Image (spheres, rainbow, N blue to C red):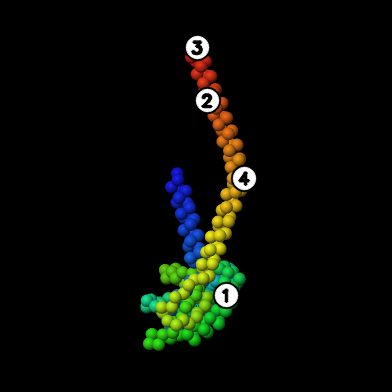
Amino acid sequence: MRWISWIFWGVVLALFAALLHYNLPKREIVRITGVEIKLERIDPNSVFWAAPDTGTPVDGPVERDVRFIDTVRTDGKVMVFRNEDTGGGWPPYFKFDSANLQAEARNLVSSSADPQWVAMRYYGWRLPLLSVYPNALSAKPVAGPDVRLIPWFNIVVLVLLAALIWGVGVRLNRWTRAHVSPWLDRGDRRVEIWNDAIRRKRAARAERKKML
């Protein structure tokens, strides 16, 4: 049955890794080709769009204007970002300046003949089949397409998260040894006493049969 445990923990780790990959910020070197506002039909309960309190506060699917930033990556492939406020919801980026970011992106629009490369900071995934777009957080001009970006924020978050998991694991292990293990040991001793009693009863029964 050990393989069931491996599958369970493998699924848990995969979901946790996907959660981190979606919510932690990423940066992409891009060239902005245009900005636009499109009318999108959005379910307020969708996890891939802004929370209802930062959009239109209604109960059912609605249509509302969403800002988009069109870009081209260094490898020539296009990348489309949505530009929505996160407000005080999840993930906790407290983004309230989507209008300002749209203006900054419009100012950074460039052509392939005279490119202005930009480090686009964002979170989320691009899933064309589900019409899911990553949400842009900031746009900063960079010297060129080969600039090296070190994800210090992600490094700090992952180190703190690893330290938290390690600390909780150590304390949970100590608590288990102090409270759970003695209880299990007492249970094991009771089981052993019960088994010994059954074995003695069976041995006595076998002796009586031999005497008969």
Q: Most extreme residue toward the right, as rendered?
A: 179
Residue found 47% across the figure and 51% down from its top = 8
The residue where tag 3 is placed is 212
In terms of secondary structure, where does tag 4 sit? helix
Label 4 amino acid? Ala
Percent from the top left, x then y, of residue 163? 56, 60
Is residue 181 visible to the viewer in this orientation of the structure? yes
Of pointers 2 and 3, the one earlier in the residue sequence: 2
Label 3 amino acid? Leu
Of pointers 1 and 3, the one earlier in the residue sequence: 1
Label 2 amino acid? Arg
Front disc: 4 or 3: 4
Cα distance, mark 1 to mark 4? 45 Å
The residue where tag 1 is placed is 95
In terms of secondary structure, where does tag 3 sit? loop
* Label 1 crowd (10 A; few <14 / some 14-19 / many >=20): some
Label 1 amino acid? Lys
* Label 3 crowd (10 A; few <14 / some 14-19 / many >=20): few
Cα distance, mark 4 to mark 3? 52 Å
Q: Most extreme residue toward the top, as rendered?
A: 212
In terms of secondary structure, where does tag 1 sit? loop
Q: Do the residues bearing badges 2 and 1 touch, measured as CB atoms within 8 Å?
A: no
The residue where tag 4 is placed is 178
Q: Is residue 111 above or below residue 16?
A: below
Of pointers 2 and 4, the one earlier in the residue sequence: 4
Residue found 54% across the figure and 23% down from its top = 200
26 with respect to 172 (left or right): left
Of pointers 2 and 1, the one earlier in the residue sequence: 1
What label does residue 199 carry, if any?
2
Front disc: 1 or 4: 4
Q: Do the residues bearing badges 1 and 4 touch, measured as CB atoms within 8 Å?
A: no
